[in-house]
């Protein structure tokens, strides 16, 4: 059988056997899932513009932590993934656990940055720790290897698609937080911190850390953003 016919057949088989949606345990989840889908394109682009990298964040979230948690989970749930593989995973840290995370990063960086130049790093880390919480984004490698075995013709693509899915999940969370006027920034201290994070929060072996996002109330807005010329960026044919 042609490999793409094999893919088509198994995709159809998978679609027919789709698992039924689980009943949410958290009433906030239910509330979010039943919200009407009514955003207009103008709303979306205004939100896309409002989402920025915010470095000056505080601990005074405009919503309850439980509500923020539910928003983060729903944004990741609704993000697309190759073959609906849902390879994205997240560790959501609030309050003291967020502080613990940034103390962990500081400890790991101290091991690799010379003491005499650590002050700049230290100031930066103080800024991240000043935020209210963080989301650590992982990709489940078991999901990827399972797909590679199941769809041999696409084997090389699944790790790439996993990275793309992670980016989409990160953007979805960033936007969902921005919509509630919660600022965020995105950091990458992986893989330096991976092992200690795994041990500290009992992270499964198959979860690979891809990015760390801080969030909190916006203490200072981002600077104005510049853009490259459209003619360098877009080709439109009609
Ligand atoms: C894939 C990716 C990696 C990034 N990594 C970092 C990072 O490690 N540290 C950081 O401070 N910002 C990071 N950023 C944020 C970018 O610097 C930021 O998005 C860019 O300057 C545009 O600004 P804006 O987010 O305000 O639109 C990253 C963004 C993306 C999309």
Image (tube, grey):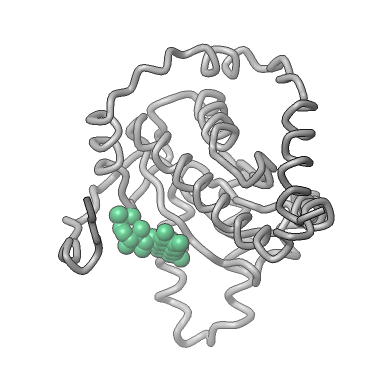
Q: For ligand 1, which image quadrant applies?
A: bottom left
Whether residue 49 sits left or right of residue 120 in the image: it is: left
Residue 10 vs residue 218, the one in the foreground:
10
Whether residue 77 sits left or right of residue 49 in the image: it is: right
Residue pictured at 57% horizontal, 67% vertical: 189
Label tally = 0
Query: Please, is residue 67 above or below residue 215 in the view?
Result: above
Residue 226 vs residue 119, the one in the foreground:
226
Q: Quadrant of residue 84?
A: top right
Whether residue 134 sits left or right of residue 199 in the image: it is: left
Residue 206: image location, x then y, percent = 80, 55
Q: Is residue 5 visible?
A: yes
Q: Quadrant of residue 18?
A: top right
Residue pictured at 45% horizontal, 73% vertical: 121
Query: Please, is residue 93 above or below residue 159 in the view?
Result: above
Query: Please, is residue 197 above or below residue 13 in the view?
Result: below
Residue pictured at 30% horizontal, 33% vertical: 44
Residue 68: image location, x then y, percent = 50, 29
Whether residue 181 sits left or right of residue 230 in the image: it is: right
Residue 44 vs residue 82, the one in the foreground:
82
Residue 4: image location, x then y, percent = 71, 52
Residue 142: image location, x then y, percent = 81, 53
Furthest residue in direction front, as rendered = 1
Residue pictured at 38% horizontal, 43% vertical: 58
Q: Is residue 55 visible?
A: no
């Amino acid at each position: 059988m042609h490999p793409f016919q094999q893919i088509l057949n198994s995709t159809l088989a998978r679609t027919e056997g789709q698992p039924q949606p689980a009943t949410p345990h958290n009433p906030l989840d239910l509330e979010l899932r039943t919200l009407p889908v009514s955003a207009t394109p103008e709303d979306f682009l205004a939100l896309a513009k409002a989402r920025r990298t915010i470095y000056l964040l505080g601990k005074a979230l405009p919503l309850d932590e439980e509500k923020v948690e539910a928003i983060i989970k729903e944004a990741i749930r609704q993000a697309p993934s190759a073959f609906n593989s849902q390879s994205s995973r997240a560790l959501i840290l609030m309050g003291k656990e967020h502080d613990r995370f940034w103390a962990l990063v500081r400890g790991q960086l101290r091991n690799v940055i010379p003491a005499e130049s650590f002050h700049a790093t230290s100031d930066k880390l103080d800024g991240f720790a000043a935020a209210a919480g963080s989301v650590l984004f992982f990709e489940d490698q078991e999901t990827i290897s399972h797909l590679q075995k199941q769809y041999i013709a696409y084997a090389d693509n699944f790790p790439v698609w996993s990275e793309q899915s992670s980016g989409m999940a990160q953007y979805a969370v960033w936007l969902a937080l921005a919509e509630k006027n919660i600022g965020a920034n995105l950091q990458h201290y992986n893989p330096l911190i991976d092992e200690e994070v795994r041990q500290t929060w009992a992270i499964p072996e198959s979860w690979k850390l891809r990015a760390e996002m801080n969030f909190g109330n916006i203490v200072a807005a981002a600077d104005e953003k510049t853009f490259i010329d459209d003619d360098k960026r877009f080709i439109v044919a009609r």
